[in-house]
Image: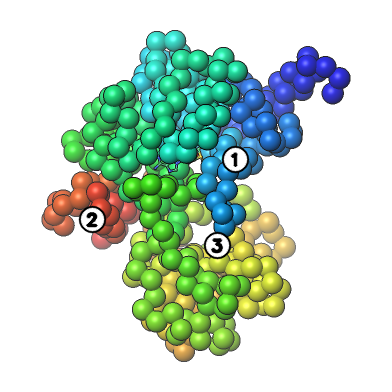
Amino acid sequence: MNSTSDLIDRARQLREEMIGELRRLSALRTDRVADAFRAVPRHLFAPESPLESAYDPDRSVVVKRDTGGAATSTVSAPAIQATMLEQADIEPGTRVLEIGSGGYNAALIAELVGTRGHVVTVDIDPDVVARTRRFLDEAGYPGVRAVHADAEHGVPHEAPFDRIIVTVGAWDIPPTWWNQLVEDGLMVLPLRLRGLTRSVSLRKVDGALVDRDHHQAGFVAIQGAGAHDEVFVPLAGDEVGLRVDDAPPADPAALAAALARPRVEQWSGVEIAGTEPFDGLDLYLATHTAHFGILMALQSAVDRRLVSRWARWGAPTCFSDQEFAYRVTRRAGDSDRAELGVFAHGPDADALAREVTALIRTWDRDHRLADRRARITVLPAGTPDAALPAGFALTRKHTRIVVSWPGAT
Ligand SMILES: C[S@@+](CC[C@H](N)C(=O)[O-])C[C@H]1O[C@@H](n2cnc3c(N)ncnc32)[C@H](O)[C@@H]1O
């Protein structure tokens, strides 16, 4: 590229292509949000990234890693940013708190709220706050407030907010977020549920946060007072393990021994189209089994046929004391469709595989359609069981989270 004007032209062209792709993915649904993506030069907030990849709809840009190499801060991928901004339904003139900074998403929000609105972004990492401030100024958004704090306490001196958008994987919802949101306001957050993460749009009504919709998401985990570590249970050295975020297996050695036994395969007969999402099934499995986690594996374990390739990306897994069973797919004939199935290991792998296969069939029959998907309701900790909606309840320090399935008896 020869000149600054060439760069600006190329970036503008890449933005248009990105917007087209985000629309095709249904991440972008409204012109208002599309216009915000058109207005903000994303590459100014990700200078470490080559221009083309800065505008890749599915690519995040890592800003910082911890000493073990895990990302602690990223500029999130455009696809999830678009999804969350659509979920947040931000109107001109509103007051928005963004938890987890980077600058780009805050600039998009600033476009949506306009000159009468107010945007505050907060981050626990002073380096992230410094770069956020710098990039926002350089890109022409001096009005956005960038605050350095642990968001566990919200940002009381700027509250209340009409919208709270959390851009870091949250394990719980502290009372401050709840209290700093106006009644009828929306909170959009990537909520961690038994190893799965769902970006949930919640409306605050009558002492509850009620799900408007939710989508599959992946985010770096929250740090500070609200941090919650997952447990990694090794099943074959560091090559295969189970990631568990609530009760870990009672006897990890028994599950490691299970993996050494031959696997049992069960196929459900339930097929999905090539591009059809089935994250609803994973949430169904997670909320219909006593013990649930995510099976993870290195490529070497897949190459040795210890586990299926699904474990490379994280396979939803139901486990008992001595068995575990994980969800897989295989190509259905010559079509672009795939059949859902289960691989199980352990002394009574057959029984667990049959149980999980039956759950897949029930999900297909009763909960696959959009209007029969899960609803997520969040209530304050201490809400008695009798006052909870029917469903699977998770109890956290500050909240009780209920996943309900319409029509389930
Ligand atoms: C995915 S990044 C945010 C991306 C950003 N919103 C963007 O424009 O793309 C998540 C951020 O959350 C921050 N974070 C983690 N725990 C936090 C906490 N307790 N309070 C505030 N920020 C936190 C991290 O430092 C990290 O910068």
Q: Is residue 235 visible?
A: yes
Q: Quadrant of the C terminus?
A: bottom left
Image position of 68 (left or right of 349): right
The amino acid on which the numbered mark 1 sits, given as a three-letter code, is: Val
Question: Which mark sits nearer the N-terminus, 1 or 3?
Answer: 1
Q: Please tell me how crowded label 2 is: few (under 14), some (14-19), or many (20+) other residues with Cα within 10 Å.
A: some
Q: Amino acid at mark 2?
A: Ala
The numbered dot on residue 63 is 1
Label at residue 390:
2
Tell me the SS state at disc 1.
strand
Q: Quadrant of the N terminus?
A: top right
Cβ at disc 1 under 8 Å from ligand 1 = yes
122 up-or-down from 349: above or below: above
Report which residue position mark 3 lands on. Answer: 314
The answer, for residue 375, to whether it is visible in the render is no
Q: Position of residue 154 (x, y in %)?
A: 32, 34
Residue 130 percent across, percent down from the top left: 52, 29
Q: Residue at x 45, y 43 (%)?
A: 168
Q: Secondary structure at mark 2?
A: loop
Q: CA distance from mark 1 to mark 3?
A: 24 Å
**Which residue shows up at 34% across the image and 68% down it?**
247
* Vertical order, 98 against 364 (above or below): above
Image: 64 above or below 121: below
**Label 3 secondary element:** loop
